[in-house]
Amino acid sequence: MSPTGNVSEVLIKTKASTSRILIGESIENLGNYVSGRAILLVDKNVQKLYKDFFKNYDRILIEPGENSKSLDGLKNIYGQLLEKGVDRSWFIIGVGGGVATDIAGFVASTYMRGLRFGFVSTTLLGQVDASIGGKNGINFEGYKNIIGVFRQPEFVICDTEFLKTLPGKELVNGFSEIIKYSLIADSELFDYLDSSYESILALEPSSTHRVIKRCVEIKADIVMRDEKESFERRKLNFGHTIGHAIEKLSGISHGMAVSIGMVAALRISRAVSGLKKEDEERAVSLLRKYGLPTDFSYGIDEIMGAIRKDKKKEVDSIYFVLLEELGKSVIRKMKFRDLKKVLDDLC
Ligand code: GLY
């Protein structure tokens, strides 16, 4: 069906499929996007808050948190699908944040060699990043998303009403990725995030809609050019190489770790790709406005140790995303020893 009212639709067209991202659509209209029998894979916290809505659907509950993205978590879900008699004619719908949609996409892509699937994304991080773009995976042996598939959901409903009940720290995770999009691809978005931060932080509806839509457009553009991350999609990892290392070492949330990773990448950009000091300062100050940490005070050796174990590394180097200016990113292959030297010089 065509979306109505204040719903914006962004399409991700790839060789195999078209994925419809519906910003501002309501979960109430889920039935309009699904054909055949449906089963929901729902985050337990979302189910608790919106239980009346879910009572009419077959569903499997997912424990919140990264631990669910495991082989044991999958085993439990495959078992329940078999018990409920789910077959290839069914439609799987993941409802929740990145954990629920990652699991639902992976299960839907593997159970009985693949069922149709879609998502209702309920977190800011999910709506701008995790549920968009067709990466579906689970963690294994301490490596994040190391087992997974690329497969686009038929639709992603980004129901912004859910954001009203999202804990503050979850919102902050989303803002980190939103700022990332502005830094890598859109200086106008950067200016808007900077000038309108009060209404954006207050989740004023038109600002929220505008920001999510723009982030989805940027991601859709990149994914359509490079779905399988041969090159350009790496730009979406800005701040993530060092961010993931910090997340692993310190246990702080993804968004916060990525914020610190972006601060490090901004510093490296000044040294390597010509980013101006005033642009670095503006970017750091924007991260602070959104309540994100910017203090880069981790041991370089520890960070380098974790980067050397990054699943995206090559033998002695890693692709690193840098900025030339606000809104303009480049991908550079950097040898570990050069990266270490730049970090040593900077810190
Ligand atoms: N979150 C990074 C990507 O989707 O490629």
Image: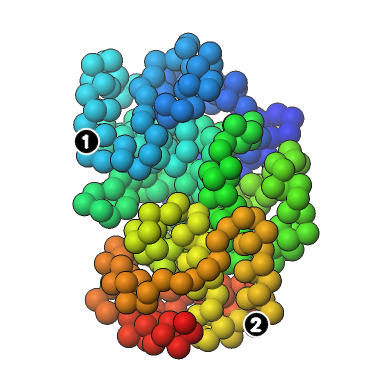
- Residue ID at (39%, 15%): 58
Foreground residue, 325 or 165? 165
Residue 233 visible here: no
Depicted 171 relative to depicted 58: above or below? below
User: Percent position (x, y) of residue 20?
Assistant: 55, 39
User: Percent position (x, y) of residue 274?
Assistant: 59, 85
The image quadrant where one finds the N terminus is: top right
Judged left or right of residue 85, residue 178 is: right
**What residue sits right under mark 2 in the picture?**
277
The mark found on residue 308 in the picture is none
**What residue sits right under mark 1 in the picture?**
72
Foreground residue, 63 or 272? 63
Queried on whether the Cβ of the residue with tag 2 lies below 8 angstroms from ligand 1, the answer reads no
User: Percent position (x, y) of residue 132?
Assistant: 50, 46
Judged left or right of residue 164, residue 126 is: left
Queried on whether the Cβ of the residue with tag 1 lies below 8 angstroms from ligand 1, the answer reads no
- Residue ID at (23%, 20%): 82
Q: Which amino acid type corresponds to the residue marked 2 in the rendered image? A: Lys
Depicted 111 relative to depicted 332: above or below? above
Depicted 137 relative to depicted 91: above or below? below
Residue 104 visible here: yes
Q: Indicate which disc, 2 or 1, sits on the residue closer to the N terminus.
A: 1
Q: Which amino acid type corresponds to the residue marked 1 in the rendered image? A: Asp
Mark 1 neighbour class, 10 Å CA radius: few under 14, some 14 to 19, many 20 or more? few
- Residue ID at (63%, 38%): 23
Depicted 87 relative to depicted 210: above or below? above
